Image: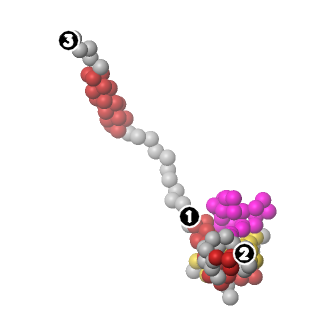
């Protein structure tokens, strides 16, 4: 069953590799016996489901979660059950892909106008005058 990321983008579960590892945290003695933390691996660099634009931005956003080979590794250990941790890891990957799919607004670099520049200089001169007035000599 594919995982719906956006209305136009979904990932087949076959591209995800989930393994279970021992987790720290809540669970008492059970935490030492049962592997409940989910480790999700997604090969973003070779995924046919991702457009090139999203793939490049995804690997940038993943940061240290991405390996040199382009595999994104997400470890989920917030919950006590394998199923909840698996769902958490998948949801975190989906959120990361949604962030990568969002196009940042194009910003045109502009310079401040002449009036704004003059206001800034006037404000600095006013503040300097205030400070200069504080350092007067006092004769007793």
The residue positioned farthest toward the front in the image shown = 29
Residue occupied by mark 3 = 140
Q: Residues within 10 Å of mark 2 (few under 14, many from 20)?
A: few
Question: Does the magenta segment cover residue 66?
Answer: yes
Circle 3 packing at 10 Å, graded few (<14), some (14-19), many (20+), is few
Location of residue 85 (image quadrant)? bottom right
Residue at x 75%, y 82% (from the top left corner): 14
Image coordinates of residue 53 in percent, x first then y, are: 66, 65
Asked whether 48 or 39 is in front, the reply is 39
Residue tagged by mark 1? 103
Residue linked to disc 2: 32
x and y percentages locating residue 127 in the rendered image = 31, 30
The percent position of residue 134, horizontal first and vertical second, equals: 27, 23
Vertically, is 127 above or below 43? above
Part of the protein shown in magenta: 54-75
Q: Earlier in the sequence, mark 1 or mark 2?
A: 2
**Where does residue 132 sit, x and y in percent of width and height?**
30, 21
For the residue labelled by badge 3, is the local secondary structure a helix, a strand or a loop?
loop
């Amino acid at each position: 069953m594919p995982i719906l990321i956006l209305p136009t983008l979904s990932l087949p579960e076959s591209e995800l590799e989930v393994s279970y590892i021992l987790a720290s945290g809540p669970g008492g003695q059970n935490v030492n016996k049962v592997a409940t933390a989910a480790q999700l691996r997604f090969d973003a660099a070779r995924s046919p489901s991702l457009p090139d634009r999203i793939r490049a931005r995804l690997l940038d956003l993943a940061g240290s979660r991405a390996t040199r080979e382009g595999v994104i590794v997400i470890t989920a250990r917030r919950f006590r059950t394998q199923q909840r941790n698996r769902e958490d890891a998948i949801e975190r990957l989906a959120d990361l892909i949604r962030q990568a799919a969002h196009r940042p607004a194009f910003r045109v670099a502009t310079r401040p106008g002449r009036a704004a520049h003059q206001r800034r200089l006037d404000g600095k001169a006013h503040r300097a005058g205030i400070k200069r007035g504080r350092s007067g000599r006092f004769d007793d």
